[in-house]
Image: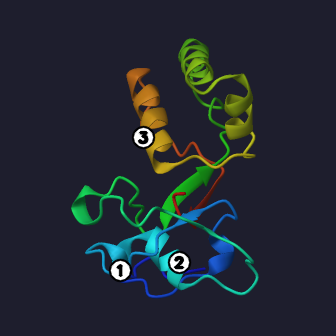
Amino acid sequence: MENREKNDMKTIDYRLIPKTFVHCSNSGCTRAAHCLRQVAFRNVDESRRTVSVLNPRLAQGEDCTEYLTSELQLFKRGLTHLFDNIPMKAAREIRDTLYYHFGNTQYYRIVNGERAISPREQVYIERVLQANGVSGLEAYDAEEYRFFV
């Protein structure tokens, strides 16, 4: 696994990049050293016959809308024990709120750990818990560092 403390990523484990990922060929961009799209482009290995690349005439630098950080992000998995020590009324409200937010399929995939929970989704889940009087709870079954793609 990559060193998550490292800020100036020159190389990455290209196996972590999805096959459908869109790369950036603009090495002159001011954000290139920290942009996952550019770092991935510099590290394409011979196992990929073709790769997708952004239009080089798109905005770059601070104005780039396609920028993705090259830092690993903390994703979490599973909520199988979320409701173990929560009062029934609060558990029902939390479950319903998460169910309606994520939808049927995604809700069950998240709860069962089949789908990773992004940092943004973790914030949402924490807010739902707090709104229902639950705080300081270790709700997740596992965690992993990966790129936000």
Where residue 67 sits in the image (x, y, percent)? 38, 60
Q: Residue at x 73, y 37 (%)?
A: 109
In this view, 18 is above or below 135: below
List x then y, in percent, for residue 52. 60, 65
Check disc 1: other Cα within 10 Å, few if <14, some if 14-19, many if 20+: some
The residue nearer to you, when weighing 140 against 115, is 115
Indicate the quadrant where residue 85 lies: top right
Residue at the top extreme of this rendering: 89
Q: Nearer the viewer, mark 2 or mark 3?
A: 2
Q: Earlier in the sequence, mark 2 or mark 1?
A: 1
Q: CA distance from mark 1 to mark 3?
A: 28 Å
Q: Residue at x 29, y 64 (%)?
A: 60
Q: Is residue 40 left or right of residue 130?
A: right
Identify the amino acid type marked 1.
Ala
Whole-percent x, y for residue 48 in the image? 73, 77
Q: Which image quadrant for residue 93? A: top right
Specify the label residue 55 is tagged with. Answer: none
- State the residue in front, 130 or 29: 29
**Element assignment for label 3:** helix
Q: Count the marks: how many?
A: 3
**In the figure, is residue 38 to the left or right of 81?**
left
User: Are there few (<14), some (14-19), or many (20+) residues within 10 Å of tag 3?
Assistant: few
Between tags 1 and 3, which lies in front? 1
Residue under label 1: 33
Q: Position of residue 92 (x, y in %)?
A: 61, 15
Q: Which residue is mark 2?
A: 41
Residue 123 numbered mark, or none: 3
- For the residues labelled 2 and 1, say whether their Cβ atoms are less than 8 Å apart: no
Q: Quadrant of the C terminus?
A: bottom right
Q: Nearer the viewer, residue 91 or 109?
A: 109
Q: Is residue 96 above or below residue 51?
A: above
As shown in the figure, which amino acid type bears the numbered disc 3?
Val
